[in-house]
Image: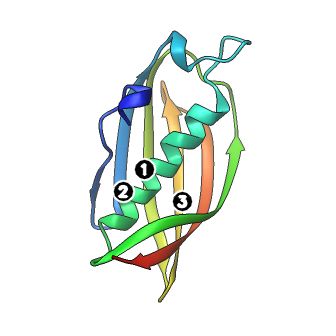
């Protein structure tokens, strides 16, 4: 997280949030927040949501689908995530990234639960 200038996501009871201030280093050639940056935010936030809901297991992303809804700009980005379904060895989680009250990204992922 330090590479992108963010603190670790805060997770509790299957939910997590992450806030980061996007600046010039997070932009693509078009001057909008790079899609890889947004993917990193949702993946990290979903991982924190899952870690807050399991004990003795580590989540590993096995499938991640991201829908980019609109471009982001420099400024505060807020990622939120929530566990939707916990299975024995797989967990499904959803996440969103918002900026200025508008949705930028919606993501759905499946995580494998690995024994610690």
- Of marks 3 and 1, the one in the foreground: 1
Mark 2 and 1 residues: CB-CB less than 8 Å, in contact?
yes
- Looking at the picture, tell me which residue is in the foreground, 79 or 5: 5
For the point 45% across and 41% down, which residue is it? 79
What x and y, as percent, mark residue 49?
Answer: 37, 60
Taking 66 as reference, is 55 above or below it? below
SS label for mark 2? helix
Q: Which is nearer the N-term, disc 3 or disc 1?
A: 1
Question: In the image, what residue occupies the spot 60% across and 17% down?
Answer: 27
Where is mark 1, residue-wise?
45
User: Residue 26 location in percent, x, y?
Assistant: 55, 20
Q: How many marks?
A: 3
Apparent side of residue 39 relative to residue 13 in the rendered image (left or right) = right
Left or right: 97 with respect to 7? right
Task: Please rate how many residues cluster around mark 3, counting C-alpha atoms within 10 Å: few if below 14, some from 14 to 19, many from 20.
Answer: many
- Quadrant that contains the C terminus: bottom left
- The residue where tag 3 is placed is 94
Between the C-alphas of marks 3 and 1, the distance is 10 Å
Q: Residue at x 54, y 59 (%)?
A: 94
Does residue 97 sit above or below 94 in this rendering?
A: above
Q: What residue is at 39 percent from the left and 70 percent from the top?
A: 58
Q: CA distance from mark 2 to mark 1?
A: 5 Å
Q: Residue at label 2?
A: 48
């Amino acid at each position: 997280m330090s590479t992108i200038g963010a603190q670790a996501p805060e997770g509790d009871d299957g939910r997590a949030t992450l806030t980061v201030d996007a600046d010039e280093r997070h932009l693509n050639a078009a001057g909008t927040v790079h899609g890889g940056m947004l993917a990193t935010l949702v993946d990290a936030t979903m991982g924190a949501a899952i870690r807050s809901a399991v004990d003795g297991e580590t989540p590993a992303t096995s499938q991640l689908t991201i829908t980019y809804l609109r471009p982001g700009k420099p400024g505060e980005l807020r990622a939120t995530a929530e566990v939707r379904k916990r299975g024995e060895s797989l967990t499904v989680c959803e996440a969103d990234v918002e900026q200025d009250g508008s949705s930028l990204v919606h993501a759905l992922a499946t995580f494998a639960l690995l024994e610690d």
